[in-house]
Amino acid sequence: MEQGMAEPLDPELLEAFLPEWLDGAVALASAATPEEAQRMIDRLRAMAAAFGIASLTRMMEPAAALLEEPGIPGIPALGEALAHQAEAIAAAGHDLPPPEAAPPPETTPSVAETAQAPRIRALVVDDSAMMRRLVRETLSADPDFAVVGEAADGRAALGLMGELQPDLTMLDIEMPVLDGIGTLREWALAGHGAVVIVSSAARPGSELAVLARRLGAASVVGKPSGAFSPDLRDRQGDAILRAARRAVGLPAPLGAEG
């Protein structure tokens, strides 16, 4: 452990720091625009400096490069990593080394590797950062998909649909600002790509599911009970992936039923 990181932090300060930091990290993970993300990063940097937590400051060093990426796809992961690091620090009572970043590739991808790169550009829309992460991981496990953006409400989703022109949007129903049905109504007028509903409010066969299909959704997948369940990929990942592949005209995953 680096020198100084093992020094204990004031428990009362940590108790005051953690809730505000987690709120900021969640807001960063949900940021819909580079400007919104930059504001949250500035706020988090100031907090980390004020409380003297060096690892959190260091983890935000790549933020400038992430903000330059179209659709800021790396920002949600940064927000989640900052939240996990702060929780670990609070549990330990002292600063901890930041998690190691994956090393950059040493060589340019070969022609064969390029040919196997993900080709279906997906947008994930859910007001839950945990659900966005789980759906993102489910799609990213399939080499035919690349998640190019995330949004936490329907209005932000429509903006990213227009900006990124995704081939596929995985859309929740119950969201602030503009819900999934309102998003579908506007998307149906001039939207791009296919939409799959992933929602506990619109389980297959329900009235909401029927309405979503009438508005053009390619498929409806119900969330398992407990939207924040960490075993979503085990219990519902196959159904999400099958629906996503079917919506964009890809065959079912090898070995999948139905």
Image (spheres, rainbow, N blue to C red):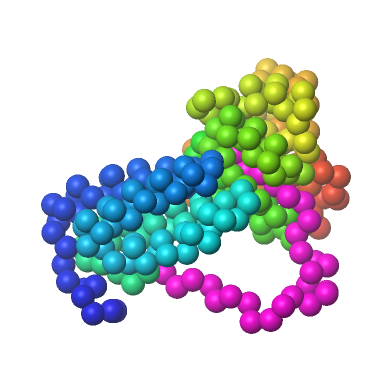
Q: Is residue 137 above or below residue 6?
A: above
- Residue at (83, 74) in percent of width and height: 112
Q: Is residue 120 magenta?
A: yes
At 57% from the left and 51% from the top, the residue drawn is 72
Locate the N terminus and report the quarter of the image it occupies: bottom left
Tell me where residue 227 appears, x and y as whole percent.
51, 39
User: Can I make out residue 236 in this image?
Assistant: no
Q: Point out residue 178 in the picture as x, y percentages from the top left corner.
A: 56, 25
Residue 111 position (above or below residue 235): below
In this image, 167 relative to 56: left or right?
right
Identify the residue at horizontal 83%, vertical 67% (top origin): 115
Residue 54 percent coordinates (x, y): 29, 67
Q: State which quadrant residue 3 falls in.
A: bottom left
Q: Is residue 192 at least partly visible in the picture?
A: yes
Q: As drawn, which residue projects farthest toward the bottom?
A: 106
Q: Is residue 122 left or right of residue 17?
A: right
Question: Residue 35's x, y, as percent?
Answer: 49, 44
In the foreground, 231 or 25: 25
Q: Which residues are magenta?
A: 99-125
